[in-house]
Image (spheres, grey):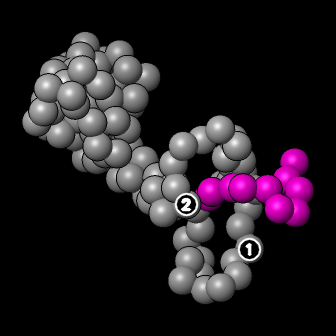
Amino acid sequence: KFQAGDHVVGISAHGVLHSHVVVDSSQVVCIPSECPLTDEQLSVMPVVCLTVIYSLKYRVHLQADQTILIHASTGAAGQWCIQYCQYISARVIATARTEEKRCF
């Protein structure tokens, strides 16, 4: 599935602060070459995604047809919240600070 030199991102609960880690390939995805995000931005995506899912699914128990207010919806966490809410069919009310961000 993966080749040496592939651009990937993944998660690991073991040894994340080491220079080399071994992870299950099911926890890794290839990054398309046209992806505009930097390695730094990509590196935090799994943590943000898992935080959102843990928060909304397991702590808040958000369900379909419920409504959620998402502040700063154009940031990484806000975008993951919107994606998760769309996935489960929850209604979203979103805020953004600037007109440019509201257009986004």
Does the magenta portion include 7? yes
At 71% across and 67% down in the image, what residue appears? 23
Task: Indicate the quadrant where residue 65 lies.
Answer: top left
Q: Which residues are magenta?
A: 1-10
Q: Residue furthest bottom?
A: 18
Mark 2 or mark 1, earlier in chain: 1
Task: Classify mark 1: residues with Cα within 10 Å, few (<14), some (14-19) or many (20+).
Answer: few
Front of the two marks 2 and 1: 2
Q: Give whichever of 62, 35 is nearer the camera.
A: 35
* Disc on res. 39: 2
Which amino acid, by three-letter code, is at mark 2?
Answer: Asp
Helix, strand or loop under label 2: helix
Task: Classify mark 2: residues with Cα within 10 Å, few (<14), some (14-19) or many (20+).
Answer: few
Q: Give whichever of 95, 28 is nearer the camera.
A: 95
Does the magenta portion include 14? no
Q: Is residue 17 above or below residue 7?
A: below
* Disc 1: which residue: 22
Task: Indicate the quadrant where residue 20 lies.
Answer: bottom right
Whole-percent x, y for residue 26 in the image: 72, 51
Whole-percent x, y for residue 67 in the image: 17, 20
Whole-percent x, y for residue 61 in the image: 26, 36
Q: Is residue 95 above or below residue 65?
A: below
At 63% across and 57% down in the image, what residue appears? 9
Whole-percent x, y for residue 98 in the image: 12, 33
Which amino acid, by three-letter code, is at mark 1?
Answer: Val
Helix, strand or loop under label 1: loop
Asked whether residue 8 is in view, the answer is yes
Q: Is residue 87 above or below residue 65?
A: below
